[in-house]
Image (tube, rainbow, N blue to C red):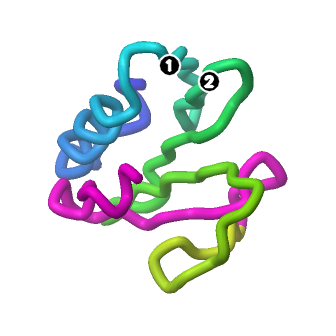
Amino acid sequence: MTNQYLGKNNLKAVFNQTIQEFGLDVTVAPKKSAVSYKMKRQFAFIKPSTKTWIGLGLKFNDKAHTQRLETSGPFGTMCTHRVQITDVKQIDDELVN
């Protein structure tokens, strides 16, 4: 996970805060360019997409896309939605719920 944030130190606090919100019963599975989160199966992953934002990919069965909860875009077939996070203040009650 350390290499994912080389040159992107400003995003490390965002990453750490996002991890805390998932809870203790979640399995964290670091990969080369992203970190997957699993319970019985993978439901989310975090990837530092650029030097200014982290992409939080999520898998939902019944959530509509919104301006904040956008289509998964280049995140592949695992995710149905994506949230772009640039600041820890964006990890709010709306996002966690």
Magenta span contains residue 92: yes
- Quarter of the view holding residue 51: bottom left
The single residue placed furthest to the right in the displayed view is 77
Q: Nearer the viewer, residue 17 or 7?
A: 17
Magenta span contains residue 17: no
- Quarter of the view holding residue 63: bottom right
The type of residue carrying mark 2 is Lys
Instruction: Estimate the x, y position of residue 79 in percent, counting from the top left.
Output: 72, 53
Instruction: From this view, report whether residue 21 is shown above or below residue 64.
Output: above
Q: Earlier in the sequence, mark 2 or mark 1?
A: 1
Left or right side of 18 for 70:
right
Which of the labelled discs sits on residue 12, or is there none? none
Q: Locate the N terminus and report the quarter of the image it occupies.
A: top left
Instruction: Estimate the x, y position of residue 22 in percent, counting from the top left.
Output: 40, 32
Instruction: Estimate the x, y position of residue 55 in percent, counting from the top left.
Output: 48, 57
Q: Are marks 2 and 1 in contact (CB under 8 Å)?
A: yes
The residue drawn where x is 61% and y is 51% is 58
Q: Which secondary structure, mark 1?
A: loop
Instruction: From this view, report whether residue 75 is shown above or below residue 26.
Output: below
Left or right side of 9 for 15:
right
- Quarter of the view holding residue 39: top right
* Label 2 crowd bin: few (<14), some (14–19), many (20+), radius 10 Å: some
The residue drawn where x is 27% and y is 57% is 93
Q: Which residue is mark 2?
A: 38
Q: Which residue is mark 1?
A: 26
The residue drawn where x is 73% and y is 62% is 62
Q: Which secondary structure, mark 2?
A: strand
The type of residue carrying mark 1 is Val
The magenta-colored residue range is 74-97
Instruction: From this view, report whether residue 84 is shown above or below residue 59.
Output: below
Left or right side of 92 for 47:
right
Residue 8 appears in the figure: yes
